[in-house]
C-alpha cells in the first residue's frame, strides 16, 4: 500500500463513545513530516466540549467494563495484538511519517508496543487473588483486586505507538476505561491504534481518544473531576509535576514516566568494541530522543582514548536521512526541539566542550542534525545536567570506578543506566550502587514488556510493564468474612 493510501485511510477525528467525531468547534491542527518540514495532513483539534464528552463516555462505560470478565479482557487484548501484527507495516509507516525515524526503528517499535498487549493478555489470566484464614479460624481474609477507575492517559511523541499501548494494555487488562491525549506531533499513530482496538471489539466508551493542541486545559478540566481516578503520563518532569499538583485535590492515583539523564559507564576491563557499538544504540536510537537515551558517557581514564576513537569511528559512519532510504538516523521532531538542542550544544562548547564529530545542523527543510560527539565539556555543565534529547554524545573521563559511580549518581534524575565491564564484582557494585529504576549490564537496551519500566527521583513514579505494571491500574480491597459453622 502506498504511503498516501495509508494516511488517507486513517481516521482524523476524536474517538468518543465508540464513534469518530469531527470535533464540536470544527477546529483542526496540522501534522508535520519532520523529515521535510511539510504538513501532510490535518486532524481534529478537540476542545472542551469534546473532552467533556469523552470523559463522560469513559464514566458511563466504567460500570460495565469494570465487571467484564478476565477472559473477555484477555481475548480483546490478544485480538488487538493480532491486528497490530497484521497491520505492522501501516503502523510503522505512520510512525515514520510523523517522527521521521528509520522504518526499521518504527517496525521495532510496533513489535515492542504490541508486545504489551500480548503480555497483559497473558498476565491477567494467570494472576490470582488471595484467600486465607486468620490463625484463629474466626474469619477468612479475601484480597481482591479491582480496577482503579477511569484513567487519563497522556503520551509523548518520541514513541507514539508504544507509549500508548503500554498504558492502554494495562488499563484494559485491569478493567479501567480511559481517555487518551496523544502528543500533538503524532496524533495519527494513536488514531490507527484506536482503530485497531475498535476492530478488536473493545466496547464503546472504554477507550476514548482526543487529540488536541490544548493539553493544559484538557488535563485541568478532566482531572478536576473526582470521578477520574488515575492519570498516567509520559513526558517532561515539569509537566509531570503540574499533573501531580492537579491530582492532589482529588487524591488521584498517578503514574509518571518523566525525564532521564542516563549515565553510560565504561569500566577499564570492558570490551571496548562492544561498549562503543552499544553506545551508538543507547545514544543515537531515535536521534537521541528517548528518556532512556545515554546522556553522559563516563569512561575510565585507562580506556578513555581507545573508547573515544572506537566510538567516533562508528559515529562518522552513521547515515542521516529520510526514513525509507536506509538511514541510520532520522531528524529531530520539530523546530523547537532542534533550536533547544542547538542551544544546548552551544552552551556545552562555550563551557569548554570540543566537538570531535558532527555538530552540523542541516539547512534542509527537515530537522536533521549530524550525530555529534563532544569531549572536554565540564562535569556539572549544561550537557551534564540537562537531558539532551538529541544526537549529541558527551564523553567524560573518570579516574576510578568509585568516581564513576559518584558521577553516575550526580543527577536529580534516576531512570536508566548502562554499565560495560567484565569483573562480576565491579558490575554488581555498579548495578546496586546506581540510583536509578533500571540498569543494563553489557547491553544498550532495557525496554521489555515483561520487565518493569520506570524511574526514581525526578524520573517519576510507578512502573509500566512487568507484573507490577498492572498494579498501577488497580486497587486492592480486603474483605473479611466471618466463618460459619459447617
Ligand atoms: P515532550 O513534548 O518533550 O515529550 P511534554 O511533557 O511537553 O514533553 O509532552 C508530553 C505530553 O504531555 C504531550 O502529549 C503534551 O501535549 C502533553 N502536555 C504538555 N503540557 C501539558 C500540560 N500542561 N498538561 C497536560 N499535558 C501536557
Image: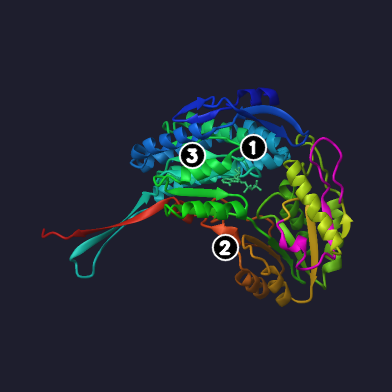
Pointer 3 local density, CA inside 10 Å: few below 14, some 14–19, many at least 20: many
The residue carrying mark 3 is: 179
Pointer 1 local density, CA inside 10 Å: few below 14, some 14–19, many at least 20: many
Task: Tell me the residue at 74%/44% (across/down).
Answer: 336
The residue carrying mark 2 is: 456
The residue carrying mark 1 is: 186
Residue bounds of the magenta highlight? 359-387
Is there CB contact under 8 Å for labels 1 and 3? Answer: no
Residue 402 at x, y percent in the picture: 71, 77
Q: Which of marks 1 and 3 is nearer the N terminus?
A: 3
Task: Tell me the residue at 83%/53% (across/down).
Answer: 372
Depth check: give the residue in front, 452 or 218.
218
Q: Distance between the residues labelled 3 and 2?
A: 26 Å
Which color scheme does this rendered protein use?
rainbow
Residue 215: in sight, yes or no? yes
- Residue 453 is drawn in which quadrant? bottom right
Amino acid at each position: 500500500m502506498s504511503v498516501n493510501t495509508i494516511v488517507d485511510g486513517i481516521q482524523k477525528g476524536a474517538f468518543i463513545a465508540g464513534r469518530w467525531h469531527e470535533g464540536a468547534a470544527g477546529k483542526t491542527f496540522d501534522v508535520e513530516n519532520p523529515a521535510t518540514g511539510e504538513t501532510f495532513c490535518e486532524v481534529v483539534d478537540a476542545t472542551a466540549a469534546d473532552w467533556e464528552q469523552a470523559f463522560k463516555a469513559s464514566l458511563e462505560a466504567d460500570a460495565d467494563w469494570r465487571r467484564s470478565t478476565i477472559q473477555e479482557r484477555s481475548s480483546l487484548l490478544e485480538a488487538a495484538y493480532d491486528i497490530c501484527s497484521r497491520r505492522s507495516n501501516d503502523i510503522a509507516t505512520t510512525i515514520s511519517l510523523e517522527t521521521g525515524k528509520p522504518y526499521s526503528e518504527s517496525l521495532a517499535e510496533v513489535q515492542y508496543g504490541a508486545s504489551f498487549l500480548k503480555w497483559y493478555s497473558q498476565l491477567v489470566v494467570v494472576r490470582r487473588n488471595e484467600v486465607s484464614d486468620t490463625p484463629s479460624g474466626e474469619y477468612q481474609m479475601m484480597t481482591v483486586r479491582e480496577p482503579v477507575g477511569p484513567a487519563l492517559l497522556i503520551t509523548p511523541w518520541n514513541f507514539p505507538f508504544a507509549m500508548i499501548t503500554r498504558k492502554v494494555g494495562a488499563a484494559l487488562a485491569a478493567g479501567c476505561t480511559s481517555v487518551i491525549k496523544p502528543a500533538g506531533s503524532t496524533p495519527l499513530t494513536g488514531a490507527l491504534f484506536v482503530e485497531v482496538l475498535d476492530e478488536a471489539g473493545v466496547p464503546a466508551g472504554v477507550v476514548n481518544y482526543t487529540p488536541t493542541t490544548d493539553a493544559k486545559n484538557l488535563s485541568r478540566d478532566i482531572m478536576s473531576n473526582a470521578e477520574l481516578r488515575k492519570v498516567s503520563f509520559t513526558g517532561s518532569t515539569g509537566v509531570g509535576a503540574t499533573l501531580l499538583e492537579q491530582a492532589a485535590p482529588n487524591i488521584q492515583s498517578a503514574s509518571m514516566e518523566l525525564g532521564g539523564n542516563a549515565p553510560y559507564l565504561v569500566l577499564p576491563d570492558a570490551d571496548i568494541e562492544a561498549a562503543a557499538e552499544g553506545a551508538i544504540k543507547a545514544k543515537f536510537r531515535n536521534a537521541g530522543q528517548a528518556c532512556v537515551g545515554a546522556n553522559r558517557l563516563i569512561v575510565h581514564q585507562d580506556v578513555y582514548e581507545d573508547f573515544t576513537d572506537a566510538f567516533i569511528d562508528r559515529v562518522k559512519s552513521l547515515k542521516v536521512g529520510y526514513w525509507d532510504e536506509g538511514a541510520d538516523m532520522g531528524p529531530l521532531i520539530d523546530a523547537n526541539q532542534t533550536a533547544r538542542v542547538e542551544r544546548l550544544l552551544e552552551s556545552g562548547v562555550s563551557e569548554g566542550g570540543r566537538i570531535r564529530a558532527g555538530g552540523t545542523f542541516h539547512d534542509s527543510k527537515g530537522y536533521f542534525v549530524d550525530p555529534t560527539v563532544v569531549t572536554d565539556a565540564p562535569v556539572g555543565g549544561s550537557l551534564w545536567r540537562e537531558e539532551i534529547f538529541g544526537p549529541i554524545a558527551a564523553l567524560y573521563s573518570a579516574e576510578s570506578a568509585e568516581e564513576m559511580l559518584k558521577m553516575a549518581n550526580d543527577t536529580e534524575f534516576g531512570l536508566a543506566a548502562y554499565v560495560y565491564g567484565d569483573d562480576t564484582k565491579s558490575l554488581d557494585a555498579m548495578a546496586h550502587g546506581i540510583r536509578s529504576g533500571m540498569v543494563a549490564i553489557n547491553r544498550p537496551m532495557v525496554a521489555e514488556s515483561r520487565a518493569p519500566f520506570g524511574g526514581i527521583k525526578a524520573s517519576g513514579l510507578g512502573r509500566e510493564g512487568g507484573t507490577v505494571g498492572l498494579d498501577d491500574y488497580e486497587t486492592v480491597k480486603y474483605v473479611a468474612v466471618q466463618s460459619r459453622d459447617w
